[in-house]
Image (tube, helix red, strand yellow):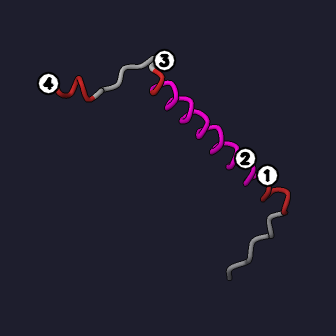
Amino acid sequence: MAVPKKKTSKSKRDKRKANWKRKAHLEAQKALSLGKAVLSGRSSFVYPTTEEEDED
């Protein structure tokens, strides 16, 4: 017969949620930083532009 699991404490739940939100916040910061670098021309990687596509 199935037995119900024990209830997770609020502190453990909140800790998990905070960690999940922190990771999302860091990824959002990275994406914003990368976008700003690309727009300002300071990017350190090669990516296709519309000018290069027109030449092919």
| Residue located 68% across and 49% down the image | 20
| Residue located 26% across and 29% down the image | 50
Q: Which residues are magenta?
A: 15-38
* Image height of 10 relative to 42, above or below: below
Q: Circle 3 — which element?
A: loop
Residue 19, labelled with which disc?
A: 2
Q: CA distance from mark 4 to mark 2?
A: 46 Å
Point out the frontmost of discs 1 and 3.
3
Q: What amino acid type is highlighted by mark number 3?
A: Arg
Question: In the image, residue 8 lies at what x, y percent?
Answer: 80, 64
- Whether tag 3 and tag 2 are in contact, CB under 8 A, the answer is no
Q: What amino acid type is highlighted by mark number 2?
A: Asn
Viewer-proximal residue among 27 and 35: 35
Give the class, few, some or many, for how many residues have Cα within 10 Å of label 3's Cα (few <14, many ≥20): few
Viewer-proximal residue among 25 and 55: 55
- Whether tag 1 and tag 2 are in contact, CB under 8 A, the answer is yes
| Residue located 14% across and 24% down the image | 56
Residue behind mark 3: 42
Q: Which of the marked residues, 3 or 2, is nearer the chain's N terminus?
A: 2
| Residue located 55% across and 35% down the image | 32
Q: CA distance from mark 3 to mark 2?
A: 31 Å
